[in-house]
Image: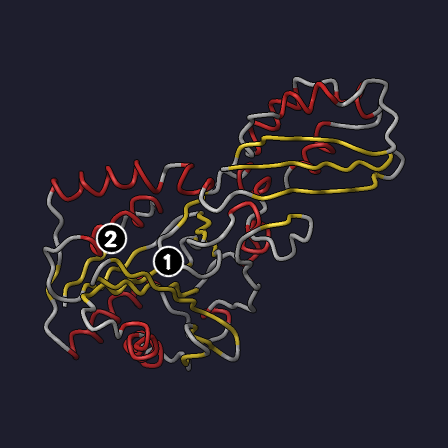
């Protein structure tokens, strides 16, 4: 087995590294890739980013948002979380049935460190009945990827701040995630575990099972990964436009201001139609704003700029603010 452990915390580069290992024919033995992302939301391949994320909170806080190749739900990564990827050739197409067995070394390492973790459901690892690890998979030709997260000391407040549970006002065509109860390992045990300690111990567990060789990527390989990172994982068309066709409807009654309803038609993360309704007391019609929103990216900063250049008080009423309308347009 090959081991590749990186100190890089750039999510686009790490996901590109993972994909490189899947696609390249150079390594004919399984690869264990150990990595971390800093301040990142990772969206599942089949999900609608606008449904899963509180975009206004995330984009204002400059959180990285990337889409991965595998399915499953949206997750938040910070340096209190670690990621592991297992990549190998799967000629007989048996990989999907091997989920539990592939996680055995991970669970064994946790158990050896005093963490009574166990496999749960189809693809989770649990501790004291709470989820500490979610896993997903992707197959490309005859190459298989299984990867997962392990929560040691992640900021779960950020998780709830950036990830959305109920977006009933968006009519989406895509798969919805179900919020699961999660916990940090170090919140459940007395003797705290350092992530670096766990990574090294996991490598030792694999050494007991088979011969281990370390991967050292060449400059040429690093440049290939960088190109993939820039062209795919930092590309808004991959991260946002994929699966992003949806109808948006939001209606709110603002105390002392009136009711406002907005309807948007969005295609590939670009607004194509916009209409406001309500009993607000603005002295101008909303047509100028509706026109300004056409062909705008469905993204916090661009919408904020449009609103800042619009006569919000004239269109909606003296007590309205740009933030009131931004909260209607994007959540």
User: On the image, which quarter does residue 88 sit in?
Assistant: bottom left
Label 2 neighbourhood size at 10 Å, few (<14), some (14-19), many (20+)?
few
Helix, strand or loop at mark 1: loop
Label 1 neighbourhood size at 10 Å, few (<14), some (14-19), many (20+)?
some
41 relative to 142, above or below = above
Horizontal side, residue 265 vs residue 174: left or right: right
42 relative to 144, above or below = above
Q: Which residue is mark 2?
A: 6
294 relative to 151, above or below = above
Dividing the image into 4 quarters, which one contains the C terminus?
top right
Of 133 and 71, nearer the camera is 71
Q: Position of residue 39 (x, y in %)?
A: 44, 47
Pointer 1 or 2: first along the chain: 2
C-alpha separation, residue under disc 1 versus residue under disc 2: 21 Å
Horizontal side, residue 140 vs residue 126: left or right: left
143 relative to 9, above or below = below
| Residue name at image x 80 percent, y 36 percent | 260
Q: Position of residue 259 (x, y in %)?
A: 84, 37
Residue 70: mark: 1
Q: Position of residue 247 (x, y in %)?
A: 63, 43
């Amino acid at each position: 087995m090959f081991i590749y452990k990186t100190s890089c915390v750039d999510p686009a580069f790490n996901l590109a590294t993972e994909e490189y290992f899947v696609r390249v024919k150079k390594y004919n033995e399984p690869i264990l890739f150990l990595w971390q992302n800093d301040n990142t939301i990772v969206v599942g391949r089949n999900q609608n980013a606008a449904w899963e994320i509180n975009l206004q909170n995330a984009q204002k806080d400059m959180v990285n948002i990337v889409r991965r190749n595998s399915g499953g739900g949206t997750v938040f990564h910070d340096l209190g979380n670690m990621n592991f990827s297992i990549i190998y050739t799967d000629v007989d197409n048996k990989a999907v049935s091997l989920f539990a067995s592939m996680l055995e070394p991970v669970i064994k390492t946790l158990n050896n460190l005093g963490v009574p973790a166990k496999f749960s459901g189809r693809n989770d690892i649990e501790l004291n009945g709470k989820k500490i690890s979610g896993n997903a998979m992707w197959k490309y030709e005859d190459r298989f990827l299984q990867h997962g997260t392990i929560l040691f000391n992640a900021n779960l407040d950020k998780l709830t701040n950036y990830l959305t549970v109920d977006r009933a006002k968006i009519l989406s065509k895509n798969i919805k995630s179900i919020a699961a109860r999660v916990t940090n390992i170090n919140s459940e045990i007395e003797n705290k575990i350092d992530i670096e300690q766990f990574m090294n111990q996991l490598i030792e567990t694999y050494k007991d099972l088979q011969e281990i060789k370390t991967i050292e990527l060449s400059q040429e390989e690093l440049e290939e990964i960088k190109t993939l990172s820039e062209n795919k994982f930092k590309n808004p068309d991959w991260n946002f436009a994929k699966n992003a066709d949806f109808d948006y409807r939001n209606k709110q009654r603002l105390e002392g201001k009136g009711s406002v309803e907005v309807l948007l038609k969005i295609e590939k993360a670009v607004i194509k139609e916009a209409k406001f309704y309500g009993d607000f007391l603005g002295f101008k019609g909303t047509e100028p704003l509706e026109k300004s929103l056409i062909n705008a990216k469905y993204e916090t900063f661009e919408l904020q700029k449009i609103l800042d250049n619009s006569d919000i008080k004239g269109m909606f009423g003296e007590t309205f603010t740009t933030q009131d309308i931004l909260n209607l347009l994007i959540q």
